Image (tube, rainbow, N blue to C red):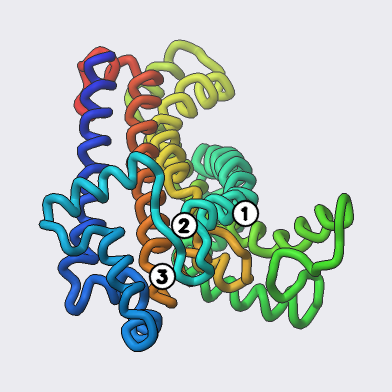
Amino acid sequence: MYKRVIKKLAVAFSTILAIITISFLMVRFMPGDPLMHLVGQERYYELQMDAPEELERIAEKYGLNDSLWEQYVGYLKSIVTFDFGVAYSNDEPVLDNVLSRAKWSLVLSVPTFLFGGLFGAVLGVLTGWKPGGWLDRILTPVMLFLNTVPSNCIGILFLVFFAFKLQWFPLNGMTSGGLSGLARTIDIIWHAGLPMLLLLLFRTASNYLLMKSNVSQVKGEDYITTAYSKGLSSHRVLWVHVVKNAMLPYTTSLCMQLGGILSGSMLIEVIFGWKGMGNLFYTAVSSRDFPTAQLCFLISAVCIVFGNLLSDIVIALIDPRIREGNFDY
């Protein structure tokens, strides 16, 4: 088990190093002056006309006059020391901007991850255990629809119907402003209601379809027939044998979803004007604020890598076949 964890950690850190290297090379080998990609095209021409010495200072700071290897070593040092530069959109430290936005992404993502995982598992077990029932006939078409239609399309429809027509929710933003204390908290929850509902529906839909498929597959295995032949009740067979084995791939999926918990709601954040990290990433790319976009990309990639690592470790802890090396996983 320890050897497996060490091996997985080595693979994870190697992957992160590869991602960092790609992120470094991406800006250096894009067509044009690397300074333009670092400061943005509009600001680049402004500085070129009004303050060329500022461009020289930025080039010196990022080591663009050094060799490629020296630039790479300097880039690694900046990551280790958490020095990601200044955002050209507001002249604030990039790390501060990203961290302040990340907490708002978590406000949406954490509840939808927890409740989406719970609802998807319970509903998937019920319909997978008794396929063709009334619950299956109602839920499966709805979940398939939610799982196949792009989230931005459903988001706009919800925005028009629930926010514009019915006025149950605000059109966008995170708060109405001018509030404090409990009133501000309630206002933020009200603004978060519609995007959180959408994320919960999408998360539940994908989890539901996965769990239903797992249960349907496991209930047809030979060891389930053997359990019935031993005189075990249907209730015991379901919760002790079927659900326990169906949870293995489901747990893997949840861990991988956890990896994308910060960046997985970008489109919803943009549509509803929610100032989270996904919205920041989108704005940084649109405005060519490369330092900010680069850090958002790195954080998202690292979270996904460690989400996959967590899934490998959790599955090995749950399944003794994997833990003992008797099962190819």
Circle 3 crowding by C-alpha within 10 Å: few under 14, some 14–19, many from 20:
many
Q: Residue furthest front?
A: 53
Circle 1: is it few (<14), some (14-19), or many (20+) Cα within 10 Å? Answer: some
| Residue at 50% from the left image edge and 61% from the top image edge | 278
Considering the numbered disc 1 on the image, is that residue within a helix, a strand or a loop?
Answer: helix
Q: Earlier in the sequence, mark 2 or mark 1?
A: 2
Q: Amino acid at mark 3?
A: Asp
Horizontally, is 171 left or right of 29 in the view? right
What percent of the width, then of the height, locates residue 99? 54, 50
Per the image, the residue denoted by label 1 is 104
Q: Which mark is residue 174?
A: none
Report how far apart the C-alphas of labels 3 and 1 lie in the structure: 20 Å
Q: In the rendered structure, are the residues bearing label 3 and label 1 in contact, judged by CB atoms less than 8 Å apart?
A: no
User: Dot 3 corresponds to which residue?
Assistant: 289
Q: CA distance from mark 3 to mark 2?
A: 10 Å
Which residue corresponds to the image point at 17% horizontal and 63% vertical from the top-left? Answer: 65
- Mark 2: few, some, or many residues within 10 Å (few <14, many ≥20)? many
Q: Is residue 273 left or right of residue 227?
A: right
Which residue position holds label 2? 94
